[in-house]
Image (cartoon, grey):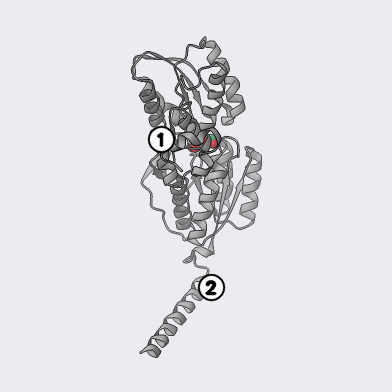
């Protein structure tokens, strides 16, 4: 009995091995190891997410799929991104995913890639006028709606003056976030917009100056702040602190960063939006691997590129609104570590919400 099973096993193994050999010899692309995926992240400063959440999630997804990959970061420099893209293409990537720094430079990279037969994917940010085969992101209008609703929930129905601090004017997402937030807040007749400005490159330092000016122009008579992500929220909170108003004026955020979650626990930030890097990176890996194999990726909709006058096949995920009550769900999902959040003065709040 045992011997027969061993022989059967050996025959099956042998067949599998020769099949595998066939797969990699014919170069026909039936095996994901035939291709190589390149990803270029935008920077390290507009949000900590790119290096702290996206990179490890992407590495995990590519390793799990057993596909060759390379991930680099353009450090906020569009020329550097173009150089990295050239290098990756020269190095033989067959699929290139970028998080553009602005649509123009992103479109140029994609055009060059297409000329050399390299398929491209927009990761997180849509390149307007670009030529990406797919767009992988969250529903960014919904992100903005969640932010608007989150601020409204924190403010209640009383009269409130609201300042809007938007993300980079060159980031299509920032436009969608702001539009989504306005679609909710503009309907509430007791709220008055008393200032709105976009922050170039999502730069947190510039955000401090910009917000301080808006705050001063409004005579400090501000009851709520829409900040497009957790980094910008941090800049806003620093000015509110300076004016003895931190914790009195609700501020929105996005990315469920450690800093954002800590501020929510301490009560200086009203909410954030959690966009699981595991989900987004997994969706990118699936789409990229389909392209490597010469197959179509599974999509769940299209996104209109108004500049390119085309609908880009998309994989759009669902974001989640996070408040103090639900910070624990981010930790439970692996989006942030309790040991990172529950440090120093924040440890006391972790006990309150059951994080340890
Ligand atoms: C992303 C946000 C991020 C921001 C700054 C946006 O395009 O969707 O998650 O906070 O860029 O990097």
Image spot of residue 180 (x, y percent): 40, 28
**Residue 168 appears in the rendering:** no
Residue at position x 63%, y 40% in the image: 75
Q: Which residue is mark 1?
A: 322
Q: Check the picture and name the quadrant holding the N terminus.
A: bottom left
Ligand 1 under 8 Å from disc 2 Cβ: no
Q: Which secondary structure, mark 2?
A: helix
Question: Which of the two discs, 2 and 1, labels the residue nearer the N terminus?
Answer: 2
At numbered mark 1, what does the secondary structure look like: helix, strand or loop?
Answer: strand
The one nearer the camera, 148 or 289, is 148
Q: Nearer the viewer, residue 266 or 144?
A: 266
Contact between labelled residues 1 and 2, with CB atoms less than 8 Å apart: no
Q: Is residue 143 visible?
A: yes
- Residue 96 x, y percent position in the rendering: 55, 51
Q: Which residue is outermost to the top? A: 219
Nearer to us in this view, 68 or 232 = 232
Residue pictured at 38% horizontal, 89% vertical: 4
Q: Nearer the viewer, residue 292 or 233?
A: 233
| Rendered view: 208 above or below 29 | above
Query: Looking at mark 1, is its residue's CB closer than 8 Å to ligand 1?
Result: no
- Place of residue 178 in the rendered image (x, y in percent of width and height, measured from the top left): 44, 27
Horizontally, is 33 left or right of 176 in the view? right
Residue depicted at 43% across the width and 84% down the height: 11
Q: Residues within 10 Å of mark 1 (few under 14, many from 20)?
A: many
Alpha carbon distance from label 2 to label 1: 50 Å
Q: Is residue 200 left or right of residue 350?
A: right
Within 10 Å of disc 2 (Cα), the crowding (few <14, some 14-19, many 20+) is: few
Report the residue marked by disc 2. 25
């Amino acid at each position: 009995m045992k011997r027969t099973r061993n022989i059967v096993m050996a025959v099956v193994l042998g067949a599998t091995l020769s099949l595998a050999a066939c797969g990699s010899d014919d170069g026909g692309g039936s095996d994901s190891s035939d291709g190589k995926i390149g990803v270029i992240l935008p920077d390290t400063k507009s949000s900590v997410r790119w290096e702290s959440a996206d990179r490890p999630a992407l590495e995990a997804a590519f390793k799990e799929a057993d596909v060759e990959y390379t991930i680099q970061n353009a450090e906020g420099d569009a020329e550097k991104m173009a150089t990295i893209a050239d290098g990756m293409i020269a190095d033989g990537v067959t699929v290139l995913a970028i998080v553009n720094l602005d649509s123009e430079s992103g479109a140029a990279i994609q055009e060059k890639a297409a000329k050399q037969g390299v398929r491209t994917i927009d990761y997180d940010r849509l390149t307007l006028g670009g030529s990406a085969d797919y767009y992988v992101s969250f529903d960014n209008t919904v992100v903005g709606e969640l932010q608007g609703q989150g601020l409204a929930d924190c403010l209640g129905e009383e009269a409130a003056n609201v300042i809007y601090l938007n993300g980079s004017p060159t980031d299509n997402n920032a436009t969608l976030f702001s539009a989504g937030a306005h679609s909710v807040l503009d309907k509430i007749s007791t709220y008055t917009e008393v200032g709105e400005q976009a922050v170039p490159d999502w730069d947190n330092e510039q955000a401090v100056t910009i917000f301080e000016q808006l705050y001063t122009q409004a005579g400090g008579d501000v009851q709520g702040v829409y900040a497009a992500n957790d980094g910008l929220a941090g800049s806003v909170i620093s000015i509110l602190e300076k004016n003895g108003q931190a914790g009195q004026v609700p501020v929105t955020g996005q990315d469920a960063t450690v800093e954002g979650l800590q501020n929510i626990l301490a009560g200086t930030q009203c909410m954030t939006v959690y966009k699981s890097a595991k989900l987004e990176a997994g969706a990118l890996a699936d789409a990229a691997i389909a392209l490597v194999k010469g197959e179509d990726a599974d999509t769940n909709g299209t996104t209109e590129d108004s500049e390119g006058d085309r609908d880009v096949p998309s994989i759009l995920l669902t974001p989640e609104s996070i408040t103090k009550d639900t910070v624990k769900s981010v930790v439970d999902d692996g989006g942030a570590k309790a040991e990172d959040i529950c440090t120093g003065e924040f440890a006391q709040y972790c006990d309150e919400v059951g994080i340890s």
